[in-house]
Image (cartoon, grey):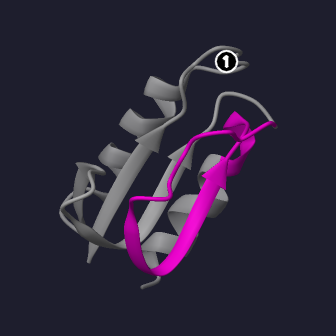
């Protein structure tokens, strides 16, 4: 399973997006291949680390097969980990 991460531009971050990335990386390590998403890759899941509820990160050039998960606050981490680890 391949998971791509996309960060928003960070103009209005309301939580530590890097800490969320690192927590997901730690808890899903060995289960999934994790990378910063780029236009050359195709991902099973795309996780967008949006700093606020505007969730304005442009994902138009990114390919994913299963689901795009948008995180807008820290409390969504557990749900996201549960979704990707059950696959």
Q: Secondary structure at mark 1?
A: loop
* Closest to the observer, 41 or 16: 41
Q: Which residues are magenta?
A: 54-76
Q: Residue at x 23, y 50 (%)?
A: 35
| Residue 61 in the figure: left or right of residue 72 | left
- Position of 61 relative to 1 (above/below): above
- Position of 36 relative to 67 (above/below): above
Would residue 72 be counted in the magenta stretch?
A: yes
* Closest to the observer, 86 or 50: 50
Q: Residue furthest right?
A: 53
Q: Residue 18, percent across and down?
A: 44, 25
Q: Residue 31, percent across and down?
A: 25, 69
| Residue 77 in the figure: left or right of residue 32 | right
- Position of 78 relative to 21 (above/below): below
Q: Which residue is mark 1?
A: 13
Label 1, residues with CA under 10 Å away: few <14, some 14-19, many ≥20: some
Q: Residue 9, percent across and down?
A: 53, 24
| Residue 29 in the figure: left or right of residue 45 | left
Q: Residue at x 81, y 37 (%)?
A: 53
Residue 68 occupies which quadrant of the picture? Answer: bottom right
């Amino acid at each position: 399973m391949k998971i791509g991460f996309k960060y928003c531009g960070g103009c209005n971050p309301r939580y530590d997006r890097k800490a969320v990335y690192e927590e997901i990386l730690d808890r899903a390590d060995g289960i999934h291949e994790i990378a910063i998403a780029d236009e050359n890759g195709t991902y099973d899941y795309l996780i967008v680390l949006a700093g606020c509820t505007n969730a304005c990160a442009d994902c138009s050039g990114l390919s994913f097969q299963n689901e795009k998960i948008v995180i807008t606050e820290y409390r969504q981490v557990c749900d996201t980990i549960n979704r990707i680890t059950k696959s």
